Amino acid sequence: MWRQVYDPFGSMAVSTLVACLPIATLLGLIAFTKTRAHVAALLALAVAFVVAVFGFTMPAGMAARATFLGALTGLFPIGWIVLNVIFLHRLTVENGSFAVLQRSIAGVTTDRRLQLLLVAFCFGAFFEGAAGFGTPVAVTGAILIGLGFSPLAASGLSLIANTAPVAYGALGTPIVVLGQVTGMDPVALGAMVGRQLPFFSLIVPFWLIVAFAGWKGMMQIWPAILVAGVSFAVPQFLVSNLHGPWLVDVVAAIVSMGSLALFLRVWRPAIVWTSPSLTGRVDLSEAKPVSADPPASSPGVLSHGSEGEAAFADAPKIAPGALKGPDVVDDRSAVVKAWTPWAILCIFVFAWGVDAVKKPLNAIWAPKFVIDGLDGQIVKTPPVTPTDVVEHAVFIFNFLTLTGTAIFLAAIVSGLVMGYTPWGLLKSYVRTLGVVRNSLITIVAMLALGTLTRFSGLDATLGLTFAHTGFLYPFFGALLGWLGVALTGSDTASNVLFGGLQKVTAQQLGLSPILMAATNSSGGVMGKMIDAQSIVVASTATNWFGHEGTILRFVFPHSIILACLVGLLVMLQAYVHPFTAMVIH
């Protein structure tokens, strides 16, 4: 057995700097060079392997097995979700129903800011609550690009919107797992998170519109933003504190979506915002239209020219049916047919999240593959954990109950309903594989990197650096959660990674363990928009391949500022009355 070493160089400063090399390589290559995301991910993985083996003394065989386990985890469930969401989207594009859906959303409001609230914030929150794991960004990014938003706006803003709901994603999975890791009641943890994130559920919609349309553009529709935020934040608080963490996002998203739609029946902005691009910056994602795959039938088509330039074609001008003109009015049956694939998707995804479906399917087939030579061979040691903890490495291939499988089945059913033949579905699926192949490579490499850093103790070294901040730990505890999600791409994985450390450090400093464990999840939601996995999902959903660095540079300031605001709120909850009265002990 190998015991993790957290300070192999005899200096925490040096050890921390060395532990940072893989993530610095990844983000540096993506943000500041023209390196493609899948190449950057593979290079960062190579750096992590060298650091783990030669810097942190991890046996090479174990490092290789950890990398393999991470690659499997990247493909299932994350890559499987992305592939099938894009498959469904392309089916709706190719038969023209997506153009009808675009016009139906525009029928609710032609204002781009309000469309952004409905799709990215409300609709995205529902998919986060029902499925999580990249699904909301994939779905909302595809819809926004189809509505005619520029690629940078569609990808970047879908990432910013997918923050406040993340802690309760996939029917409360991050909170449930946090309870398992820390040994604390998940209901209490969920309630504590519900006393932190509602503040940001109010802030994020305003923040989202400012990022898109500027301060003046936000002020023109502040009543609608307030309705969307309040109608999400209040149910988020009530459900998390009176029921539990399982249905928080689903209920809050439905209430918010319904409230905003009803409000827009009686209120309209004085000025309708029609620009699809970001305000106050040069949006280079709007370039001349060129042909792409799929051919002229695809809304929001993007392609790369010989010099890697992205091109964007306005969706309504390209999609079949949209050529009728902006004033065309679709009959009710056409609108129902256009929404049917997405309704089928919602039904399948939600059903796949409940135990009544998952347990029987898992009983049929859910094999477990033990990674020999890694499982039970690595020991986490104090102060990262209260006592020695043996790490297990088991890949559970619960293929039948994966969210991606639900999406795949929804796509097949939807395709048949839309009139596709089985042969037509197969051909479209093969084309989709070709489109997303590099994205799948990137996601696999990202998860391999995250798994290797976890088993080698690199991430624990970074976490210990945050834990040494004393009085300021509540602030840095939020940033620790942020770092965990940025590294792993998942609030659930971040809670597994740092949940125990948050509890131990809180007990040593005389803070509420429930407060700090919950803070790991609340702070983590702000790291979701900058993790490389989510950025690749966004670029894939919007067909804006090769521009992950542009997306990262756009969302990073929003991510770090919002994470710091979470940290400030936690400082108030830890030390300042009346905020301390909100803390569960």
Image: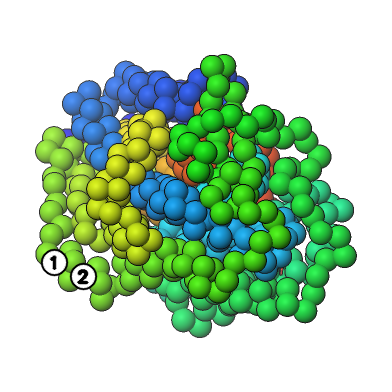
Viewer-proximal residue among 394 and 461: 394
Viewer-proximal residue among 354 and 327: 327
- Kind of residue at badge 1: Ala
Q: Quadrant of residue 183?
A: bottom left
- Looking at the image, residue 404 sits to the left or right of residue 523; the answer is left
- Kind of residue at badge 2: Lys
Callout 2: SS: helix
Res 302 label:
none
Are discs 2 and 1 less than 8 Å apart at CB? yes
Quadrant of the snapshot with the N terminus: top left
Question: Mark 1 — residue?
Answer: 363
* Colour scheme employed for the rendering of this structure: rainbow
Percent x, y of residue 83: 36, 45
- Looking at the image, residue 283 sits to the left or right of residue 397; the answer is right
> Which residue lies at the image location 51% right of the left edge and 68% below the top edge?
334
> Which residue lies at the image location 67% right of the left edge and 68% below the top edge?
108
